[in-house]
Image (cartoon, rainbow, N blue to C red):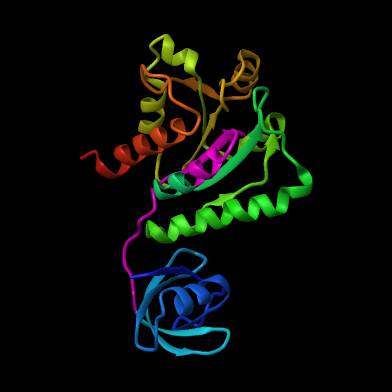
């Protein structure tokens, strides 16, 4: 059953679907009155709805039943990625959303090859946000992760005080056999806590950047004995979080 995130709060009995989702329902899926969809409210509550009417601009859907339970991780995992080249960040956002990430914060690192163009910022962030929305719908999330506009490392550190725990994935820790920081941090996390994890771009973070993060409360952690690509490391970490909270008996 197709899933759509609704911008409006609705009246708890009926929703109006418009914009790109209207086009998807009417033009792509070719749905008609009587077909059922899932509508997700801004706060994450979702309902099975039946299409009652299709006008030139909106799809009117009546609530059939509200869904119980949640598909969200019990903790908020925020992925801070050093800007990588090509479409790697799009992959991180898409797959990271499927794996349960709560938020994405790109940042410019010393070894970031890509230079952030402020003139194209709005269009780029809109595209990233659309990727997150589509991935959230596909994976039956109850929440669409927010994708922030890229910041500097110093801006990232300045905003990091609001998170419960802060880690930085550092390949030198992996080379030295560090294997306890991530697991011990996951063991401390309680439902509703937040975890900010920083990942470097291609080439990784410099030792100066890691030292700066360390001085501001970030713990350096390894991600096993193998060195992971910039687009693989966040997905590995999210998988570990999912295993710890959702699969580990």
Q: Residue furthest left?
A: 249
Asked whether 92 or 147 is in front, the reply is 92
Magenta highlight on residue 71: yes
Report the quarter where the C terminus lies. Answer: top left
Residue at 61%, 54% in the rendered image? 127
Asked whether 213 or 32 is in front, the reply is 32
Mark count: 0
Asked whether 187 or 168 is in front, the reply is 168
Residue 29, how many percent across, how many down? Answer: 41, 75
Residue 125, how many percent across, how many down? Answer: 65, 51
Judge whether 174 appears above or below 92 on screen: above
Q: Which residues are magenta?
A: 65-93
Q: Residue furthest right?
A: 119
Judge whether 34 appears above or below 123 on screen: below
Judge whether 49 appears above or below 167 on screen: below
Quadrant hosting residue 25: bottom left
Residue 67, how many percent across, how many down? Answer: 33, 70
Asked whether 190 or 27 is in front, the reply is 27
Q: Residue furthest top?
A: 176
Residue at 58%, 25% in the rendered image? 217
Judge whether 161 appears above or below 202 on screen: below
Residue 188, how many percent across, how many down? Answer: 39, 32
Q: Is residue 249 left or right of residue 110?
A: left
Report the quarter where the N terminus lies. Answer: bottom left
Magenta highlight on residue 115: no
């Amino acid at each position: 059953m197709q899933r759509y995130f609704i911008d409006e709060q609705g009246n708890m009995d009926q929703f109006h679907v418009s914009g790109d989702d209207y086009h998807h329902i009417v033009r792509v899926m070719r749905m008609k009155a009587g077909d059922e969809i899932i509508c997700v409210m801004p706060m994450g509550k979702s309902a099975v709805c039946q299409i009652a009417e299709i006008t030139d601009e909106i799809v009117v859907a009546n609530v059939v039943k509200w869904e119980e339970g949640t598909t969200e991780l019990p903790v908020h995992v925020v992925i801070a990625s050093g800007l990588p080249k090509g479409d790697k960040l799009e992959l991180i956002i898409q797959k990271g959303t499927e794996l349960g990430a709560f938020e994405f914060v790109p940042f410019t690192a010393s070894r970031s090859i890509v230079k952030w163009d402020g003139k194209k910022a709005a269009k780029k962030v809109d595209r990233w946000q659309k990727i997150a929305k589509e991935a959230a719908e596909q994976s039956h999330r109850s929440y669409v992760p927010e994708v922030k506009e890229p910041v500097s490392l110093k801006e990232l550190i300045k905003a990091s005080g609001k998170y419960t725990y802060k880690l930085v994935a550092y390949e030198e820790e992996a080379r030295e056999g560090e294997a306890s920081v991530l697991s011990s941090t996951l063991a401390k996390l309680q439902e509703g806590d937040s975890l900010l994890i920083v990942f470097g771009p291609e080439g990784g973070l410099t030792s100066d950047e890691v030292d700066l993060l360390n001085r501001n409360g970030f713990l350096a952690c390894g991600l096993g004995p193998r060195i992971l690509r910039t687009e693989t490391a966040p997905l590995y970490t999210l998988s570990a979080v999912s295993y710890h909270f959702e699969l580990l008996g």
